[in-house]
Image (cartoon, rainbow, N blue to C red):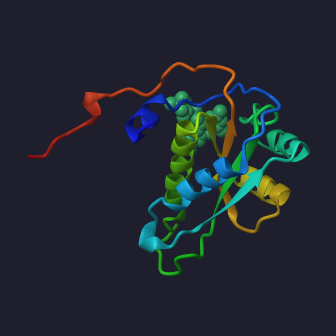
């Protein structure tokens, strides 16, 4: 699958086939894709936690109101931001954008590998971020949680091209 196909066939999947194990090399491929993302001043302000443990997936699902399908899926990749990675950053930093770029790369790589995904937002919901950080044992800031697994549904395409959102300055 080329990049253009991956972009256009990716959907948020909210129903997964239970009991599917994702091979290590596929997980590694998704993490490599994440770390190939661009980041401000190449600060790479991220770390990644792969959650396969079923009990922990249940607990995370209880702590986040919109990731109910996590227990049935294969795993979650939690993209965590390191706000201090670029000490001279402008106020607020650019680490959330950097983590978003890494997140999208994971979604696209997973699509190419034949997996369904769902990006679940964490930061800046403070209580969600703190609860998930505690559960996965990090001091960094969980920015997004990506559910990954074999899809048990084919969601309708929600993306579309909207010419009214575009201006050409020539
Ligand atoms: C920052 C962000 C946070 C999101 N959070 C959630 C979430 O918590 N739970 C969920 O099911 N989907 C979440 N989504 C997925 C969106 O609902 C989805 O991308 C949107 O409806 C478009 O559908 P599509 O992904 O199938 O194109 C999130 C997406 C983004 C980019």
**Residue 31, position as x, y percentages in the image:** 61, 56
Q: Is residue 41 left or right of residue 136?
A: left
Tell me where residue 79 appears, x and y as whole percent: 64, 56
Q: Is residue 72 above or below residue 27?
A: above
| Residue lying at the far bottom of the rendered structure | 88
Residue at 49 percent of width and 57 percent of height: 97
Q: How many marks?
A: 0
Q: Nearer the viewer, residue 141 or 49?
A: 49
Query: In this orientation, which residue lies closer to the viewer: 126 or 79?
Result: 79
In percent of the image, x 75 and y 68: which residue is there? 139
The furthest residue to the left: 170
Asked if one can make out residue 125 in the rendered structure from this viewpoint, the answer is no
Q: Which residue is nearer to you in this view: 159 or 5?
A: 5
157 left or right of 154 in image: left
Residue for point 29% across, 34% down: 165
- Kindly indicate the quadrant of the structure image that contains residue 38: bottom left
Q: Position of residue 87 (x, y in %)?
A: 53, 80
* Residue 86 seen in the figure: yes
43 over 38 or under it: above or below: below
* Horizontal and vertical percent position of residue 23: 72, 45
Quadrant containing ligand 1 reads top right
Which image quadrant for residue 4? top left
Q: Which part of the image, by quadrant, shows the N terminus? A: top left
């Amino acid at each position: 699958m080329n990049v253009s196909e991956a972009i256009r066939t990716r959907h948020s999947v909210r129903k997964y086939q239970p009991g599917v194990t994702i091979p290590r090399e596929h997980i590694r491929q998704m993490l490599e894709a994440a770390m190939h993302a661009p980041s401000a001043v190449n600060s790479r302000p991220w770390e990644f936690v792969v959650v396969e443990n079923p009990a922990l997936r249940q607990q995370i699902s209880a702590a986040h109101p919109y990731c109910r399908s996590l227990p049935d899926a294969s795993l979650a990749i939690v993209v965590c931001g390191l706000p201090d990675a670029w000490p001279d950053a402008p106020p607020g930093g650019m680490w959330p954008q950097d983590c978003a770029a890494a997140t999208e790369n994971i979604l696209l790589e997973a699509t190419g590998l034949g997996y369904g995904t769902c990006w679940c937002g964490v930061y800046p919901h403070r209580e969600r971020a703190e609860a998930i950080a505690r559960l996965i044992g990090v001091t960094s800031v969980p920015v997004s949680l990506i559910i990954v697994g074999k899809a048990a549904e084919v969601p309708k395409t929600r993306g579309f091209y909207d010419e009214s959102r575009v201006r050409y300055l020539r």
